[in-house]
Image (tube, rainbow, N blue to C red):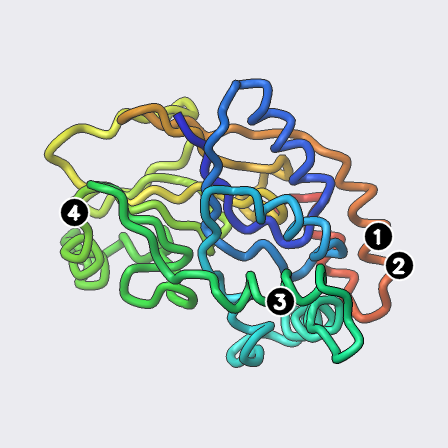
Amino acid sequence: MHAIVSDLHSNQEALTAVMKDIESLGVKRVLCLGDVIGYGPDPVACIDVARDYEFILRGNHEEAVLNGAFGFNPVARAAVDWTRDQLKPQWYSLSSRRARWDLIKDLPLMKEEGDWLFVHGSPRDPTMEYILKSDCEDFFGETPSKIKQIFDMIKAYCVVGHTHFPGVITEDSRFYTPAELGMKFHLEKGRKYIVNSGSVGQPRDGDNRACYLVVDGDDIEWRRIPYDFERTMKKILSISHLDERNAERLRFGT
């Protein structure tokens, strides 16, 4: 059994609540699909927790902190620039700060374990491409070429984050939300699935509770965990470089 977390987005309160839930289940193995940082007020604290996971993948926010926020909207770009200032070492920086920066620089784009592929965005573009519910829809009821191409790139199961919207996509291009599935799903042998684990630190599916995934063999379960989002909001609003919209969306999960 293992837990999969993604899109922590510097939200210490959400991450703390999720880690307590993971510990209560007796799960020791935690995998992270990226975007530990970005948007939120606690990048250092979140990296210091995530560095103990079995692995962290590179998300688009880690890539932007390293190489520049190309293609980001102004709100996200401002958060990236502020986050970089919190993390990038100077000549006089402590070794702990240098270690965090080195960790970010060395993050892999993908991990593969047997039938499982783990990636932040998509196998076609590991950090930037979104796999959205709307990508599954076709005017003629056929499987869109994007979905076909992605399924052709995976052996069986591909777990992604990035969209902040949890769910399962089947080979016939149907998207199912966790609520539609009763929060649990069985992955049938011989079939392929794309699974989105949801977001720990900035849910966008209308539910403001932190979201992560527990995997037990071929059975998966999304867990929704309440946390003190008001505290996170206050932290964001106290930082002039972070747009207030980063705070407000935490209240509504949008």
Three-letter amino acid code at disc 2?
Ser
The answer to whether mark 4 and mark 2 are in CB contact below 8 A is no
The answer to whether mark 1 and mark 2 are in CB contact below 8 A is yes
Depth check, front residue: 140 or 242 = 242
Q: Quadrant of residue 99?
A: bottom right
Three-letter amino acid code at disc 4?
Lys
Three-letter amino acid code at disc 3?
Trp
The answer to whether mark 3 and mark 1 are in CB contact below 8 A is no
State which mark lies toward you, 3 or 1. 3
Which badge, 1 or 4, is on the more N-terminal residue?
A: 4
Judging by the rendered image, the residue that carries numbered circle 2 is 238
Which badge, 4 or 3, is on the more N-terminal residue?
A: 3
Query: What separation in Å lies between label 4 and label 3 (alpha carbons)?
Result: 33 Å
State which mark lies toward you, 4 or 3. 3
Q: On the rendered structure, is 116 left or right of 67?
A: left
Which badge, 3 or 1, is on the more N-terminal residue?
A: 3
Q: On the rendered structure, is 94 left or right of 74?
A: right
Judging by the rendered image, the residue that carries numbered circle 4 is 155
Q: On the rendered structure, is 198 left or right of 155?
A: right
Three-letter amino acid code at disc 1?
Lys
Q: Secondary structure at mark 2?
A: loop
Q: Quadrant of residue 206?
A: top right
State which mark lies toward you, 1 or 4. 4
